[in-house]
Structure formats: structure tokens, C-alpha cells
Image (cartoon, grey):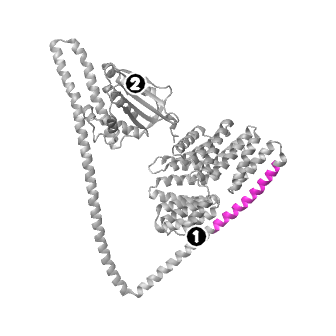
Amino acid sequence: MSFSGSLKQLWLCLLLVSATGVSVARAQDSLAVQRMHRLLAILPPDTNRVRLLDSLCVQHYNNAPEQGIVYGRQALALARQLHDRRGQLMSLLSLGVCYNNLSDSQYALTLYKQAMSLARRFNSYDNIVRSYCHMASVHSARGDTATMWRLYRPALALAYHKGVQHATQIALFGDVGVLLLAMHRNQQALRYLHRALLMARRSKDVLAQAQYTANLGTYYQSIAQYATAEGLLHNAVGLAQQQHNSKVETSTLLQLSHVLLARQRPAEAEVHAARALELARAHRQFSYLLDAYGTLAKIEAARGNFAQGYAWQQRYLLLNDTINNHDRLVALAALQQRYETQDKEQQIARLTANEELQRLLNRQLIITIVILAAGLAAFTFIYLQLRRSRAALSSNHQALQETTAELQRMAASKDRLYSIVAHDLRGPVTSLAGVTKLIEFYLNNGDEAGLRRLPTLVHQTTSSINHLLDNLLSWAVNQNGELTFRPETLPVTELFAEIVELYQTTAQAKQIQLLTNVPSQLTLYADYNMTRTILRNVLSNALRFAPVGSIVRLGAYPVAGSTAVVLTCTDNGPGMPADQVATLLHPNSVAQPTHWQRREGTGLGLVLCRAFVARQHGHLRIHSAQGQGTTIEIELPSAILEPLPT
């Protein structure tokens, strides 16, 4: 096998471990299983019993999948009996993992497709994404990267849909990253692995951090950057030890042994391989025990201890034969159990059909009683229909009242907006009318100096009207849901230069100096129009309140330890008290304007800023105090989170 083929097989093995381990990683705890069995003996046949049976299936599907199938089938049957949709989805996915671990991949795919169909029927986007990932894990064992990528693409398209849990997103991005490494698309792969690691850190999922840190270490090992790989794998071992997860710790220790062996440090490699061997024996992890034997054999061979290396290799071969025989027997037993279960289900169906036929014969013998029962049933049906109609009428009436209240609220909000817009338009329009009178006055008096001052007044008035109309258009488009979010890489220096050029004339009219402070090469991953509207409103507001002859500063800096950038705008205006700042940040500040907003403007610009910042997964903060000026901070994603183009 070539080096590239071996490397691809390594990545697919890591993906298979990740797909069955990190997303639902729960090490089998014998005490926990005992407690579950005690609880199972007293629980009635309800949805809680379904969840408990599914948990037992999950506890066994790695080390004892044949036992996991028993619990999974009981959970699925009870969920169907109770019409428990969530329980059916969970049981189908767990059973699929059991059969996949028993090498019955075709039946595992059948179960995953049933789960996918059920999830689509009930719009469970989280389970749709999980079903795609599980189906991809089946093809991972087959080495079919093309089919895996075909399955991951629709899962990525739904990754940020409402209802998809963070744990599912983390597992998806990590698995896609490992797959792309196997496909030699390293830059795109690292992007997804870093995204999964970042989300795991934010959600404090230490086990996921350990898995994806180990994946990154394996990547750097594959490109012969052993020092970096060693550091990452040491970190992954420490994280796995914090969680007491022997599976991840064992696999990472074995990988670290390979890195140390490549760095000509066989003694240290032996220490970590021996620790992995100890963990594999303690937790009966036979596949890792096999890997430990092979690793120790390579270490002894590298040190020249060929006799000891041969002994380890003999243990490897003996255990490999034992595992293969055991896996075949277990897989055959699972197939036999599945066929016996299907046969019993068919027998039950036949008995049910015979019982129905006998019931029909009995009905023919007691036809008189049936006629009386039918009349009674008709009367009962009419009574129930009347009750349902009354309940439906009451429900429709309540819905109509709620709709009416919502329409009244929307009408009141729009009326308030119209009055605010009329108020703000009246000022600039009155100023424009005054300018026309000044033109007539200066012309009649031949005052050329006065005429020269008029263009500046006209520019300021029309700019104010244009700014208000821009905000109104953006607000209307945002309210109608027609504004499309199109993120792209935006250099901060170019954004600031454009905004400063736009408001330079306004600043000069008040003798205000505009200063910018931006590190070079600082970029955002944001929507250009939304970000430009945010900066335009913030700078316009600062120029409005800044005193004549003062300084307005625009700045930007990356957030330490995070993939985000903060844009700032600072003025030396009169500032605001804390309660006024809280009111401005309130989500209903347009519908319930403050005294400051009635006196100074519509407040619509700030509403747009809040809406556009939230649309881009950012944060808006205001720092102000009376007499000390105001600083507005806008935190937006950095361009490092740019997704992979499809």
C-alpha cells in the first residue's frame, strides 16, 4: 500500500471513531448500567421507559452491540406503541450504530433512512443532520469518500438551521474536517476542524476538544511536523484524562507513541504505548489492545530488540485472529436474531389477521345487536362532533382575538413610526424652505458672501434627508424579510476610508477632526451593505452630538482569544446616563422611544444597527456617562470563519 493510501485509511479510521464516539460519546460505566437496570424494573411503559431503554442501547453499542440491539428494539417497539416520535428517532439511530458496529452496514443504512424519513416528516432538522452523519459513517468503514461527501453537503447546508443543536454542529464540522483531510483538501479541512474546536471550547465540551485536538495532531504528523503534532496530542491526552474517557485517551496515547517514535525517542514512545495497553486491557477495548501490541512491536524493532518485538507481534496476530472470529460469530448471531424477529413479526401479523376474520364472523351472528350498537354509535358520534365543533369555534375565536391584538400593536407601532418620521422630516424640509428664502434675500441685496454660504447649508439639509430616507428604506426591507444576508471578506481600512470620505464635509462644517486607528490586514467576514449602514449611522450620530472643534475617533482591534473584530466610534459629546443607554439597547426602543429620542431623532438608526449586528451574529455595546462622551462598540466575526464554498 502506498503512503497516500495509508494516510487516507488513517483519516477514515479517525472519522469512524469520531462519528461513533464524539457526537454521543459515553463511556460504559458498570455502576451507571446497574442503576439503569434497577430503574427499568420499576418504570411503567411510558416515554421515560423509552428514553431509559435507548440509553442502555447507547451504553452497549460500542463494547456489546448485540446486547445493545435487544434494548434498542424494545425502545423502538414501545415508542411506536406510544406514538413517541422523538423516541422512535433516537431508537432508530442507536440501533443503526449497533448494526454498523456488527458489520451489518446494509441494515444500518436501512435504519438510518427510516430515521431520516421520520425526521423529515416532522421537520426535526437536528435529527436530519444526525442521520446524514450516521449514513456517512457507514460509508467511512467502506472507504467511500465520494458518497460521504455527497451526504455531508446537505448536512452542511442545514447546519445552522433553527433546531440543530450545538453538539450536532460540532460533530458535523469535525467529521467533515477529517474527511477533507483524507481527500487532501487540507486548508478547507483545517477551517472546519478549527471551527469545531472553537465551538467545543465555547460550549465547554471538553471531550470534543480532546478529539479534535487529537485530529489536528494527526494532521501535523501526516505532514511530518512532529513537534507541533506532539504538543497537540499531549494536550488532547490531558483533556481526555479530565473527562475520564478511556477510549479517546487510549487512541491519542497510541498516536503520540507513533509521533515520538518518528522523532527517534523510543523510550518515551514505549511509556505512552504501555499506558495505552493498560487502559485497553482495563476497559476491554480489544481494537485498541490490538493497536497497542502492534505499536510496541514497532518500538522494540526500532530499538533493536527484535526478540521482544517478535513476541509483541505474535500477541498481535493471536489477538487479531480471536477478534475476527468473535466479530464473525457476533455478526452471524445478530443476523439470526434479526431474521427471527422479523419472522415473529410476520407471525403476529398473521394471527392479527385471523383474529380480525373471526371478529367479522361473530358480527354476522349478532347482527341485531350490531344494528342497535350502530345507532348508539351514530348518536354518540353526532354528540362528539357537536362538542368538537364548539371547541373548534372557541379556539378560532381565541386565535382571532390574538391576531386582532397583534394587528393593533403593529398598527400602533407604524403610527408611531410615521409620526416620528414626519417630525424628523419637518426640520430638514423647513430648513430647505428657509434656504430658498435666503437665496431670494441675498439676491435682492446683492450679498455674494451670503450666497457662498448657502451650498453648505443645502448640502447639510439634503444629507440629513437622504440619511433619514436610507434608514427608512433599510428598515422597511428588513421588516419585510427581503434583505438578503451575503457575508464576504471586508478589509476594515477600506470600510473606514469610505465612511470617513462620506462624512468629511459634515465634519468640516462643525470643525470636527475624524481620526482612524486600524491595524493593517484586519478583515471582517460580514455583509457589506449591512456593515456600511451600521458604520454610517454610528458616525452620523457621533458627529451630531460632538461639540464644535472636537475629535471623533474610529478604531478597530481583534478580540484576544477569539475569532472576532471590534469596531469602535468615540466622541466627546454630552454623553448619556446609564438608564438612557439601557433604554436605547432595549429591543422595543422604537415602539417606546425615550425622551432623548423624541428630542434628537427617530432612533431608527440605532434599531437598524441592532438588527444588522444581530443578523451577522455580532454584539452591539454602548459605553457612556453624562459629560464624558460616548463610545459605541460593534463586535463582528473575523474573516477566519469563512465557510467552505459548495
Q: Would you say residue 319 sits in the magenta stretch?
A: yes
- Of residue 270 and residue 347, the one placed in the foreground of this image is 270
How packed mark 1 is, by other alpha carbons closer than 10 Å (few <14, some 14-19, many 20 or more), is few
| Residue 326 position by quadrant | bottom right
Tell me which secondary structure the magenta stretch mostly adopts.
helix
> Disc 2 marks which residue?
553
> Disc 1 marks which residue?
342
Q: Position of residue 103 (x, y in %)?
A: 65, 59
Which amino acid lies under the numbered mark 1 shown in the image of this protein?
Gln
Q: Which residues are magenta?
A: 309-336
Residue 510 badge? none
Disc number lying in front (2 or 1): 2
Label 2 and label 1: CA atoms lie apart by 74 Å
The answer to whether residue 304 is left or right of residue 424 is right
Disc 2 element: strand
Q: Would you say residue 173 sits in the magenta stretch?
A: no
**Taking the image as drawn, is residue 527 in sight?**
no
Disc 1 element: helix
Disc with the residue nearer the chain's start (2 vs 1)? 1
**Residue drawn at point x = 49 percent, y = 50 percent:** 165
Relative vertical location of residue 334 with respect to residue 320 in this rendering, above or below: below
Q: Position of residue 127 (x, y in %)?
A: 50, 55
How packed mark 2 is, by other alpha carbons closer than 10 Å (few <14, some 14-19, many 20 or more), is some
Which amino acid lies under the numbered mark 2 shown in the image of this protein?
Arg
